[in-house]
Image (cartoon, rainbow, N blue to C red):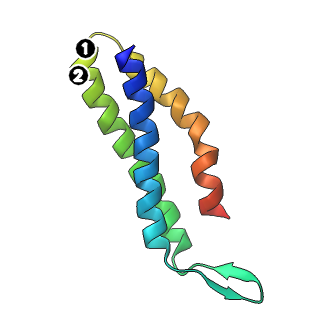
């Protein structure tokens, strides 16, 4: 049970951390005729696409080695959680 909760929290936490870094890189918005323009939105998206899987895998690997050495349960729970969280993180970055 602890491995399941840890896997879910690690994927959500790595998504939030990646989102924070991407928002920082994205820059301050500037509005022109009601359209919000960010200075580095493409770089922010690429940063998020790189850091989210790396951080998620790292945290899941630590959980697997700590709690369940012979089971891949944290990886499966992490994949399911990541797929469910993708729209929550990607839609604001693509907007």
Question: Tag on residue 69?
Answer: 1
Query: Which residue is at 49% across, 29% downward?
Result: 79
Q: Is residue 89 left or right of residue 31?
A: left
Name of the residue lying farthest toward the left: 66
Query: Which residue is at 48% across, 53% downward?
Result: 49
| Crowd rating for badge 1 (residues with CA inside 10 Å; few <14, some 14–19, many 20+) | few
Query: Which residue is at 29% across, 22% downward?
Result: 64
Question: Tag on residue 65?
Answer: 2
Please tell me in which quadrant of the rendered image residue 4 appears: top left
Q: Is residue 75 left or right of residue 92?
A: left
Q: Is residue 4 above or below residue 18?
A: above
Please tell me in which quadrant of the rendered image residue 41 appears: bottom right
Q: Is residue 78 left or right of residue 3?
A: right
Q: Is residue 7 visible?
A: yes
The reply to whether callout 2 and callout 1 are in contact (CB within 8 Å) is yes
Give the quadrant of the N terminus.
Answer: top left
**Residue 13 point in image, percent of width and height:** 41, 43
């Amino acid at each position: 049970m602890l491995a399941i909760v840890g896997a879910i929290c690690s994927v959500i936490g790595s998504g939030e951390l990646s989102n924070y870094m991407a928002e920082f890189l994205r820059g301050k918005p500037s509005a022109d005729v009601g359209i919000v323009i960010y200075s580095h939105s493409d770089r922010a998206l690429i940063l998020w696409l790189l850091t989210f899987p790396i951080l998620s895998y790292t945290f899941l690997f630590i959980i697997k080695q700590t709690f369940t050495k012979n089971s891949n349960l944290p990886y499966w729970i992490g994949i399911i959680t990541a797929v469910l969280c993708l729209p929550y993180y990607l839609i604001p970055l693509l907007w």
